[in-house]
Image (spheres, coloured by chain):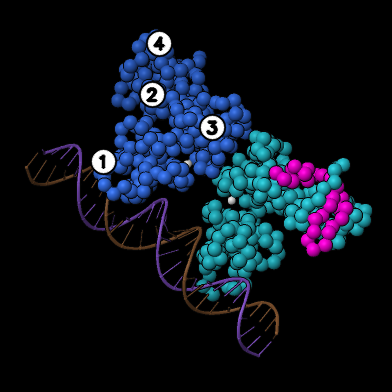
Chain colours: A cyan, B blue, C purple, D brown
Amino acid sequence: MSAAREETGTETLTAPAEDYLKAIYAIGKGSGPAATNEIAQRLAIAPASVSGMVRRLADQGLLAYERYHGVKLTESGRRAALRTLRRHRVIEAYLSQALGYPWDRVHHEAERLEHAASDELVDRMAATIGEPEVDPHGAPIPTRDGSVDETEYLSLAQLAVGSAGVVVRVSDEDPEMLRYLAELSILPGKKVTVKSRAPYDGPITLSVGRQELSIGPSLAANVLIAPLADRGGGRG
Amino acid sequence: MSAAREETGTETLTAPAEDYLKAIYAIGKGSGPAATNEIAQRLAIAPASVSGMVRRLADQGLLAYERYHGVKLTESGRRAALRTLRRHRVIEAYLSQALGYPWDRVHHEAERLEHAASDELVDRMAATIGEPEVDPHGAPIPTRDGSVDETEYLSLAQLAVGSAGVVVRVSDEDPEMLRYLAELSILPGKKVTVKSRAPYDGPITLSVGRQELSIGPSLAANVLIAPLADRGGGRG
DNA sequence: CCAGAAAGTTAGGTCATACTAACTTATTTT
DNA sequence: AAAATAAGTTAGTATGACCTAACTTTCTGG
Ligand SMILES: [Mn+2]
Ligand SMILES: [Mn+2]
Ligand SMILES: [Mn+2]
Ligand SMILES: [Mn+2]
């Protein structure tokens, strides 16, 4: 076996490479293999381009790649992904807490800064705002040494009718959605109770605080919940 | 004249393009033309590569380029250069003031962040630290609308023996030099008096506060001074 | 189990940015 | 003013990252 250019140590990754690794990590959280098409879709890139990039990343020892069968992160790839994820989330938290940046725009800004900020800067940011454990959307921040809370939560769309939970996390990419969630006051930390769910992708009615409201299932799918132990938490 | 692709508006500049524009601005402060070799040297790039890049920037309407005779910034190029310079210096000031970043390392960090930070972020940073007018090395920060103080100062190497001045600015790129200057307490705002200068590039003796010290001319050339009006300020 | 659909790859471009080597133009020196 | 030197450009190559079009492999459902 003619060993390809293995990881020689810490050759610096390009911004696109870091974004690929993050995307691959996000798909199947490092467990299952990530499909070319899904990577392509997440990054808004043609599948053909993904094939090419994936080969390069595999040559660098960051991915295990089997032609026609998707990719998985290697240990080294996972470390790199988590390093970028930490940067991204610390930056989001810092922008939000230290600079009053609105929560619907931190993601876009962090998406570029994550590739430019040094570890030292990121650590200083984290220290300055008191070593936050989650970003403004509730996503857990990996630690310096590369561990993360990988708890999987139910989405609001999966929560059983009648049960209650606390919003732990919302998806962070769509500014318009974030503004709408804030308007409805569906925010990390808020307690919600599912009142009803209409069939055939119908609206979900819930109470947040003292208000009652009704949202569509695709919005609900973007809100993750930690169930409060009362009336069972499984899918309804 | 077959008009090349003129500036169509605000096509986003790449990081290398922004660095070229900054370098060209720094050479001859927008007045004289910048020589290919000098651009190459500042950016640590081969002269041949500069020829290529300069042509592309000229095609974008950012430079006036005459083959074999160097380049000048156009109005649009100058604006772009000052936009990047503002980002760079605000970032340096912010890192230093808000995050306690040491002054010998802010430049390196800002050199990357300047290409990733949005105008909004830079403006928030500036606001947070009270709209600074100079960066940690004393360089003036361009305003949002693109004006800068372009006062030219004498260097400590040019200051007449016997005359005094205030350190306004030191060059910012070499961390080791910056640490040494801090050690000698040659810092922006400090008053210095030139006591003597030995011929043939000999050491320059000066007093800073109550201490007397002696530095080489190449270090002195990196320290800019606002003369205090007493015993004439011209070259000695 | 096999045809059609879906998924994925290769082939062949493009663009930006850099390099070295070879050449051309400009400047300086004699 | 010619020769020598310095400065600058072109030619040809490489790499990374993207694209579309055409092809191949895998999956699926009848
Ligand atoms: Mn984000
Ligand atoms: Mn990114
Ligand atoms: Mn600087
Ligand atoms: Mn830069």
Are the numbered discs 3 and 4 placed on the same chain, yes or no?
yes
Mark 1 or mark 2, which has the lower sequence index?
1
- Does label 2 lie on the same chain as label 1? yes
- Which residue is depicted at the point 62% across and 72% down? A69
Chain ID, mark 2 = B
Q: Which residue is mark 3?
A: B90
Q: What label does residue B229 carry, if any?
A: 4
Q: Hey, what amino acid is under mark 4?
A: Ala
Q: Are marks 3 and 1 in contact (CB under 8 Å)?
A: no
Quote the CA–CA distance across marks 1 and 2. Answer: 25 Å
The residue segment tinted magenta is A179-208
Q: Is residue A182 magenta?
A: yes
**In this view, the mark in front (1 or 2):** 1
Q: Amino acid at mark 1?
A: His
Residue under pointer 1: B69
Q: In this rendering, would A62 be left or right of A147? A: left
Q: In which quadrant of the rendered view does residue B207 lie?
A: top left
Mark closer to the chain start, 2 or 3? 3
Which is more N-terminal, label 2 or label 4? 2
